[in-house]
Amino acid sequence: MAKQHVVVVGGGLAGLAATMKLAEAGVHVYLISMVPVKRSHSVCAQGGINSVNDLTRQQGDTEWLHFDDTVYGGDFLQHQPPVKEMCDWAPKVLDLLDRMGVPFNRTAEGLRDQRRFGGTLYKRTAFAGATTGQQMLYALDEQVRRWEAEGRVEKFEYWDFLGPIVDAKGQCRGVVAQDMFSMGMRPFAADATILATGGCGLVFGRSTMSMICTGGAAARAHRVGVHYANGEFIQVHPTAIPGTDKLRLMSESARGEGGRVWVPRKPQDSRDPLSIPASERYYFLEERYPTYGNLVPRDIATREIFDVCITQGLSVEAGRQCVYLDVTELAAETQKKLDGILEIYEKFQGVDPRVVPMKIFPAVHYSMGGLWVDYERNDATGGLVLGSPRNQHSNVPGLFVIGEADYQYHGGNRLGANSLLSCVFSGLIVAPTVENWLKSLPGRSADDQPVSLFDEAVKPHKNRQDELIHNPGTENPYKLHEELGDTMTCNVTVVRQNQQIESTLTKIEELSDRYRNVAISDKSLWTNQNLSFTRALGDMILMARVVAQGALQRDECRGAHFKPDFQIPPPDTDDPAGLRRQAERWCKAFKEQNEKWLMTTVARYTPDGPRFSYEKVDTSLIPPRPRTYGLKGAEIIEEVWRGMTKSSEKAKAGAGS
Amino acid sequence: MSKNFTVKILRQQTQHAGSQWETFRVDYEDGMNITTVLQRIAADPVTVEKKETTPVAYDACCLEEVCGACTMVINGRVRQACSALVDGLLEESPTGIELRPMTKFPVVRDLVVNRRAMFESLKKVKAWVRVDGYYDLGPGPRVSQSTQEEAYPLSRCMTCGCCVEACPQFNDHSSFIGPAAISQVILFNAHPTGATEGGARLDVLTSDGGIADCGNSQNCVKVCPKDIPLTDSIAKAGRDATLHKIRQWFGR
């Protein structure tokens, strides 16, 4: 049998973790990336990585509570076994990163320091200054470079993934990719293909994501049959710096270290913010959410900032929407821990945030949804069967998906500092899975497949490229992208109304038609970025449809998906008996909502647009319960809900005996 | 009438083609940076002479100066295009902005250069911590706050190439490895586990193209976007390399 190969597409945290772990096991890896892997989007992750640790453990924290916070924060939309496994592994992941030299901040005693992040009451987040993602990526990049020097990893940087190669039986046999300098295309025969290609923020025009986060790779896999799940769940980060080319993230760690969000009580108060007395400042998150304060989960903070600016007209500025994020009151040594992000603000805004409150506004940040993947549940632990070939395996045999590109870990809303964990974790666990998959392949490796399979796989991409270059069109791809971003940002982000989403779908239809008439101004076949971008634009239009159509169909509020028309009316009375009645009504509606919508959205590609089906979510470990952050009568709702679930369990037990 | 300004860009079709200047007029926007300028030109690639041309090729990724991709020479100074704000550039040079590719690397096209040599240098100096493996083997070594505070700034190097672009010793006629790689030697030699390969790293620095080739111009530290104390690293590497050689003479 010829030698087996694995292709990893994408060299961010997930792709690098998978690559190094496979290389350690002696597997030969082709690592393909659009950019030198050291420049991957993971560098933008700022705040940190979550894990139960020695300190929080003694305050009552456990892996189970990390798991609970994650599924509660995610509004119970994730299958629970993979999430449980991830939280159980978190301390091990931290130790490994520590051993590889990630310069985590230290306590006086030399231990890893931790800060608090959103959606939890524990200080679970380890960090390296305010550039934790960058530091973790570098550690993994260094490990992979070591394997590259030893010949186990071959890197193809500045190569664009064009699509998986799927044989007649529907099995993935590798990928086709294009050298972005010479524009030459070639097949990579592989026995397993791992996509670690990140999120799709550019579908929204400007976001906190990097230029490469188009969702192009996911769309190219989707087109040949890989299902896309929970596409409508897009995280909008509460705090970003508005910009002309990008909305730059201002990490949650600013609030984790004590930064406070506020607006002047007097609309557009023109005074110097520092001269406005505390009594005339509206610390709206602290007032509305006394328990979590500025560290409520992201979807909630985002909606509150929207509400304050748009509904209440309290934006700091008249001409544009923004609120203050204030770190000026923090001690100098605390500010120092935030240097990495405060520098970004200073560099791009020309104002020192250590002395002047920052002006920020929400921005599209993370794709909770992604390519559909499977897992195998371990009934003894409630977690995963490690090494099972089903883990991280898409519906196309031989094609695995990890990192932000998969849909598995964050449900309806991701908690801060859980993404670095899910990326490294899924990268680490996919390695034994792929090893076992390789062992299970009968006799022949991808190298033994007929050459024609690979030659034929390149042809459609060549034809498509010729068509694009010679298209006698008039539409400007950059302008089409701007229009796509505008309609998606306006109508399919924080507050969603069906009528507006429908108008966006009509717009996407129009853009899709106009895309057929797109003109490429650069006809050359050397480092043609115009061509690469235009190809990705077609993919973004496809992704936009999956996101918008999914959002239209889901008539409920869950996590980041907020449709006021379908919100269960929150209790509002002060009368105790009335409040209880309202709470009962609320819980009944909540139960019905879960029966209908506690489902994974699964989009299947068809040439006429996505077809949707809904899959039941495994909530066998932690029964779903109302997410009551800031809700009036929260305690009564929780009590009523506990009563309702107890009696239904009793009924079930009774029926079973 | 909206305010606009001119941008002169040194362009080159392919690796081996000659280069020529093209000038564009761009409408001013508040808070605009050079990557926005390049995006606007891509959307409407017409020169001031009304000649239709192609979008300018350039590298860019994170747009917040943590990935190092968009490094180029802007108004004669090497820096990242994303954090180069038009306001400041027009103050430096009111007649217009000038962009050209870095000069120490082969040009691929327009403003895109091939910095592969820098990543190869990282391989040469074994810029990694050689761990026993990726299984769960307990926590890493304890690290004091002061050690972390020395390591973190060095670890923020994006391999962007500013330091070697500014370094007079890094050129076609020399094999000098450059400040970035030397600083990485200091980073990994200071790590308790990284230090196990410290001798091999110093061997690289004491051979051809090593520390002796530094001409001490101190340009590197002035252009580093992350304020990495490169000259401190070089001074320390010089001392460590000398001691390393002496130890080798005396058979350890």
Image: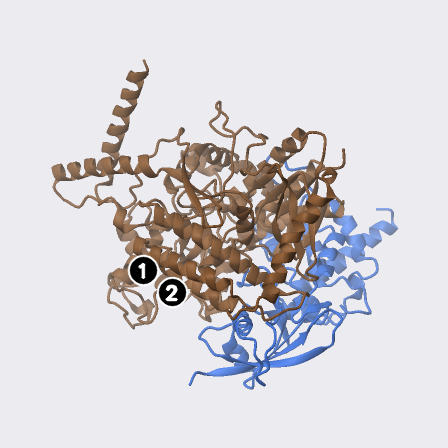
Chain colours: A brown, B blue
As displayed, is residue A202 above or below residue A270? above
**Residue at x-position 62% and y-position 69%:** B57
Amino acid under label 1? Trp
Element under disc 1: strand
Element under disc 2: loop
Residue A601: where, in percent of width, then height? Answer: 41, 42
Would you name the residue on which mark 2 appears? A357
As displayed, is residue A38 above or below residue A476? above
Query: Mark 2 vs mark 1: which is more N-terminal?
Result: 1
Residue A183: where, in percent of width, then height? Answer: 68, 60
Left or right relative to A382: residue B111: right
Residue A401: where, in percent of width, then height? Answer: 56, 42
Locate the N terminus of chain B and report the quarter of the image it occupies.
bottom left
Tell me the subunit letter for badge 1.
A
Specify the quadrant of the image occupied by residue A585.
top left
Dot 2 crowding, Cα within 10 Å, few <14, some 14–19, many 20+: many
Mark 2 touching mark 1, by CB under 8 A? yes
